[in-house]
Image (spheres, rainbow, N blue to C red):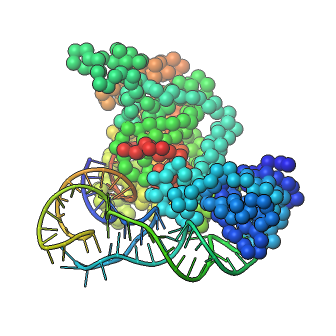
Amino acid sequence: MEKMTAAQARQVEAIGKHVRLEGWLRTRRDSKGGFSFLELNDGTCLGNVQVVAPAALPNYESEIKKLPVGASVRITGEVKQSPAKGQPTEIHADRVELVGTADPEKYPLQKKGHSFEFLRTIAHLRPRTNTFGAVMRVRNRISKSIHDFFQERGFLYVHAPIITASDCEGAGQMFKVTTLDLNKVPRAEGAVDYGQDFFHRPSFLTVSGQLEAEIFACSLGLVYTFGPTFRAENSNTPRHLAEFWMVEPEMAFYDLNDNMDLAEAFIKRLIKDALEHQAEDMQFFQERVDKEIIARLEGVLKHDFVRLSYTEAIEILLKSGQQWQFPVSWGTDLQSEHERYLSEQHFKKPVILFDYPKGIKSFYMRLNEDGKTVRAMDVLVPGVGEIIGGSQREERLDVLEARMKEMNLDPEAYWWYLDLRRYGTVPHAGFGLGLERTVQFITGMANIRDVIPCPRTPGSAEF
RNA sequence: UCCCCGAUAGCUCAAUGGUAGAGCGAGCGGCUGUUAACCGCUAGGUUCUAGGUUCGAGUCCUAGUCGGGGAGCCA
């Protein structure tokens, strides 16, 4: 006898085999015809396996007829073609074993649909629902495609550190890492004496692996990082998490155009793989979550992304005739309403904005000849907004140092980063893609807290 | 952090300042190669918390907690 997954048992190729299946009961329907229908799910696919349990089984009256939703069971039986609509195959059980019961008076998951808000309060049980199973399978597929995409192109996977001592990477508030006793913080001359802390200096959870990725791009060529990222910002939106996963490719001898080409090919690959390999899950999102998701994604695959300079974008926004809550003017950052207008209304597809005013971007972005703009790029997608932020990096030592002074950064603190420009500097570029925002974009899930196993948001870290 | 909205049965929601209800779920019974099955019956409530107004508060007021949406920050 062969152990089989639900995904395998639902294929017609399995017909005729005697198999063992293990999983959780989604529902039970008893028939007076002398059997019960059990629907088994083991997470390997969206659909359930229908099990026909005949009344002749020795534990039929004592156990099978009482099996509650949520119970874990082990089934053995023969896979047969199903005579009824709804499933290609079914298991005719010769043995049904209750592994662990679930008190129906207390088990929170019901056969009916639940709100995502409620499911968030039982995040330990929500992967047992159709939606979260599908989210997790698509998330897994996207993760695999990320590696496939880069590995096929010869990129090295670099493991950037989680703990960092760079306290001003320019990406917002950081979580502090310390082993000091917070009840008795050592002090020297009034200030906290970090000399006594674990690293003998202040340290933090990373907000980006970019600076470290640059080290390896400037020695090994094409690299990417893929790992957790932490932002201690008090952000309360459906698009922000305090802990999220980010992919950061970094490429030597790439300019901004190469960077944009790569970003576009990358996003398209993730979409293509999800549609192709998670078709059943994607169909589910189409039916239950977002009626237009598949058409939208197929549209993204078909067309080139719009590439628009910041300056051109400002012109479009000024000429749009729209009433803006925030005024549009050259030199200020675009507001959500502006970005949404561009990708959702004006172009109705992904837009790559580039060449932003230097005043609103980070110190490491390459200065253009005009002296006013930098080689930055943001990829905006309908529904989610910014999904990628990146740039060509400033490889000229003197320009970089001047920029740092302009922004009141201490070049000494970045001595090793500057060394990369001091010795054998090369033009290079890279970007960061938010994994969860990508999962949102591909599944149509509205809230980022519903596309990560255990969401971390201000005031919330229960699971 | 700011603005807006919300919190009533296990879940989703209703209830003019005057006896707290429905659907689904659950339990029991019926029916059926069933498909979010169907039909009947039953149980199920500190109306988020603490104050206040009122003869009387689920309903009005104040504060707080939690949740959602929008904004900012960004991925």
Residue A214 position, x and y percent, is 52, 28
Quarter occupied by residue A249: top right
Examine the rendered structure and indicate whether residue A326 appears above or below residue A177.
below
| Nearer to us in this view, A452 or B10 | B10
Q: In percent of the image, x 53 and y 28: which residue is there? A: A160
**How far from the left and from the top, in percent, is residue B62?**
17, 58
- In the rendered image, is residue A326 in sight? yes
Residue at image position (85%, 54%) is A18
- Relative to A9, is A225 above or below? above
Is A240 rendered above or below residue B32? above
Q: Nearest the camera: B39 or A118?
A: B39
Residue A370, image x, y percentages: 39, 38
Q: In this view, does A177 lie to the left or right of B3?
A: right
Residue A280 appearing in the image: no
Count the numbered circles shown. 0
Query: Residue A233 appears at what percent x and percent y?
Result: 36, 41
Residue A82, above or below A306: below
- On the rendered structure, is A122 left or right of A33? left
Front-most of B48 and A241?
Answer: B48
Q: Residue at x 34, y 43 (%)?
A: A234
Q: Which of A380 and A208 is in front in this view?
A: A208
Name the residue at the right extreme: A16
* Residue at the image point whose x is 56% and y is 60% from the top: A104
